[in-house]
């Protein structure tokens, strides 16, 4: 239980560091988070596949949202055609939660998805405001799209985590 709480708390610190630090501090925060995560939380190196999966999903999903004008990034030193590092670091952080503070959702994936559909859009709205990212569509349309995306992302995360656990031939505490 304590490990799950620490995992959740460390992710929240990462969230604030990425949102408030932007391009300048986020890379250091992401590296620190991932090193601490590996040292204190990772029980099997295969957990990194779920984290990598979420970074790749972030490249495509937030990349598409940026490209289509749903998210309008502030001017930045980041000029590549993918989301900035601070945003991808958040995706890595989400991927790091499934084996730990979100492990309860492995047996209740629909409940996890409903929670994500409610709270992930809230995170986007608050994060956008703090990071000076503009939302390119109406609040209702943005909320609906984010709810839909994150509902299904939790299903993907649960599936990938269960598959990883099964392939390792071990059971995971829930």
Image: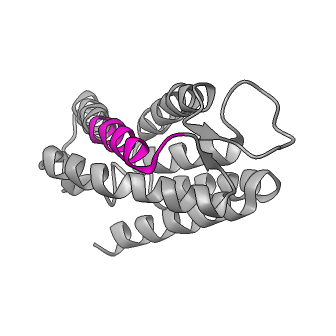
Question: In the rendered view, would you say 25 is above or below 59?
Answer: below
Position of the N terminus by quadrant = bottom left
Residue at screen point 83% across, 55% down = 24
Residue at screen point 24% across, 32% down = 159
Count of marks, rendered view: 0
| Residue stretch in magenta | 137-153
Q: Main secondary structure of the magenta part?
A: helix
Task: Name the image colouring.
Answer: one colour
Report x, y in % for residue 147. 32, 44
* Farthest-out residue, front: 138
Which image quadrant for residue 162? top left
Please name whichever residue, 139 or 128, is drawn nearer the observer in this view of the structure: 139
Question: In the rendered view, would you say 23 is above or below 129?
Answer: above
Image position of 105 (left or right of 64) = left
Question: In the rendered view, would you say 142 is above or below 65?
Answer: below
Report x, y in % for residue 6. 43, 71
In the image, residue 60 lies in the stretch drawn in magenta = no
Image position of 103 (left or right of 131) = left
* Farthest-out residue, right: 77
Residue at screen point 81% across, 37% down = 78
Which image quadrant for residue 16? bottom right
Is any part of residue 153 visible from this angle?
yes
Position of the C terminus by quadrant = bottom left
Is any part of residue 36 visible from this angle?
no
Please name whichever residue, 33 or 142, is drawn nearer the observer in this view of the structure: 142
Image position of 108 (left or right of 163) = left
Report x, y in % for residue 110. 14, 45
Residue at screen point 57% across, 29% down = 59
Report x, y in % for residue 66. 61, 32
């Amino acid at each position: 239980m304590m490990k799950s709480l620490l995992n959740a708390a460390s992710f929240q610190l990462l969230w604030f560091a990425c949102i408030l630090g932007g391009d300048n501090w986020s890379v250091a925060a992401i590296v620190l988070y991932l090193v601490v995560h590996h040292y204190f939380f990772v029980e099997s190196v295969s957990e990194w596949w779920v984290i990598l999966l979420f970074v790749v999903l972030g490249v495509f999903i937030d990349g598409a949202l940026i490209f289509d004008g749903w998210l309008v990034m502030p001017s930045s030193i980041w000029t590549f055609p993918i989301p900035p590092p601070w945003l991808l670091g958040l995706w890595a952080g989400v991927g790091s939660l499934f084996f730990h503070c979100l492990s309860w959702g492995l047996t209740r994936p629909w409940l996890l998805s409903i929670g994500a559909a409610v709270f992930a859009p809230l995170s986007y709205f608050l994060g956008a405001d703090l990071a000076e990212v503009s939302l390119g569509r109406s609040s209702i349309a943005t909320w609906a799209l984010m709810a839909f995306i994150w509902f299904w992302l939790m299903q993907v995360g649960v599936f990938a985590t269960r598959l990883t656990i099964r392939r390792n031939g071990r059971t995971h505490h829930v």
